[in-house]
Amino acid sequence: MKNKTGVCRALLLVGMGLMIPCYLFTAGNTLLSPWPLYDRNRLALCLLTPLCLLLLLLLGRAAKAKVFETHERAVLLGFAAFYFVIQLVMASALRFTPVTDLEQCVTAARRLAQTGAFGDSERSLIYFGRYPHNMGLVYLLAGIFKAADALGADALMAAALVCGLLFSMGLLCAARLCRRLGGAQAQARALLLFATCLPFLYCTSELYTDAFSVAFAPMIVFAFLKARDAGGRKERALWALLFAVCTFFGAQIRFPTIIAAIACLIAGLFEKRAKLTALLAAPLALVFAVGGSAVNAANEANLGAANIAQNKLPKLHYIAMGLPVQSDEGYGQYGYGGWLIFSTSFDDPQARDEALRQEVIDRAYTLARHPAQLLSTLSRKNLSTFGRGTFNLNEIFEADAHEADNAVKQAVFENGRFNRAYTHLATAMFVAQMALACIACIQAIRRRDTHAAPLFLTLLGAFLFLSIWETRARYFFQFMMILLCAGAMFETPSTHTAQKA
């Protein structure tokens, strides 16, 4: 029995360790890759990153101050309140008119809130037939808009309010999960690391899936830890249910949220906690079965089953976009690859799927036969995903091309006067945060400590998924709280001596 436990723990440690080369490669690629992404100065990034890492290490020492222990809850609630207030201030400063994908979601949500029906707009039916995964955001916004109309409030500011509340809840869960893993000092480190993530100051102004989903991964991991450490069956069952509910709702906003739940289940299984894993998996499967059926029924009622079947893009569409073979080929659907045009040019869905399947095979074969081209592709795609510490969130609220008419916009907008300096600082800090998470993982492996395995496995899963799937700089943002929690495990004492949250 001890041998089996030792093997499982060793395998789990190996799984944790796999995230280290992934993110060290990412850090090096972001600093040194010659591929153009934006007007970036590689020398400036190489000089700034060590300084940022030094700052993070100094903050780790600062977290040992007694104030974080004696006034633990006051500091925690103060951080949450600060971020909630600053998000509302930034939402006002970055006010914008939704366009592109967000405009589709907002328009559909307003129609649902006002009439209770989706309507017969051909434009909306085609868009959501192609992207039914965005319907989760539509239903959430519709509920917010309906409440805002009843109260006579501004609909978009109400959405920013809810997004800010979600963010603060995610921050609280992230801090408390660090508290469970490493005590009050780990919680303090997490809060100080949060303060170094500059996009956290304004992210909820985006009002898109990236911002609405950022809180769910730490909620999922926190629920897992509470279930793992619960003292009784009823308490464990309650947290297992919350684990399932958080995963389901997070997945409706942005499906890769489920990576955090999978990481938790893998950690539980390899820690030889079979009963816990089964207890978590059962309600998770039930909630997804029942909730998924309800969502599919609502989608079919609003969009029409035939419309979804005709327009929905297959998964191979996104994988094909994730396997570019030309250096000038875009990673988005409207890039030089023309994937949206390609995938919508077939009248027969079966013919389309076969053409996509063959295209994926051809691309994979081409890359496999040319290692240099494969490395080039990995480098370019990795840079496209992780190369901006701003996560290109301005892509959403700068899309309506309004002027950078205040100090915040001058920093955040790509055409702003201070944007280049801000982008380099945020990117250097992001690279330093990745490096700190890798160091923390190395420390955990040396201690043979798997208690924080869900954090490191989530990061590994996110990296692998974004390496295969179509990707943008915004897509990793939903896992930023997990990355910072992983960094907060640096110099963490054993969880056996940590106090319970």
Image (tube, rainbow, N blue to C red):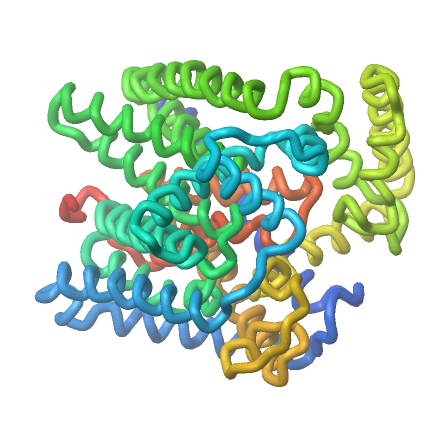
Asked where in the image residue 496 lies, by quadrant, the reply is top left
**Quick check: 220 left or right of 34?**
left
Against 466, residue 297 (above or below) is above
Against 105, residue 128 (above or below) is above
Asked where in the image residue 311 lies, by quadrant, the reply is top right
> Is residue 485 among what the camera can see?
no
> Is residue 479 among what the camera can see?
yes
Residue 163 in the image: x percent, y percent?
39, 52
Q: How many marks?
A: 0
Residue 444 in the image: x percent, y percent?
38, 48
Which residue corresponds to the image point at 38% horizontal and 23% vertical from the top-left? 269
Q: Nearer the viewer, residue 303 or 150?
A: 150
Residue 439 in the image: x percent, y percent?
45, 57
Which residue corresponds to the image point at 31% horizontal and 55% vertical from the top-left? 168
**Quick check: 229 left or right of 357?**
left
The quadrant of the image that shows the N terminus is: top left
Q: Nearer the viewer, residue 393 or 97?
A: 97
Which residue corresponds to the image point at 35% horizontal and 49% vertical from the top-left? 148
Residue 245 in the image: x percent, y percent?
34, 28
Which residue corresponds to the image point at 44% horizontal and 75% vertical from the top-left? 54
Q: Nearer the viewer, residue 273 or 88?
A: 88
**Quick check: 78 left or right of 305?**
left
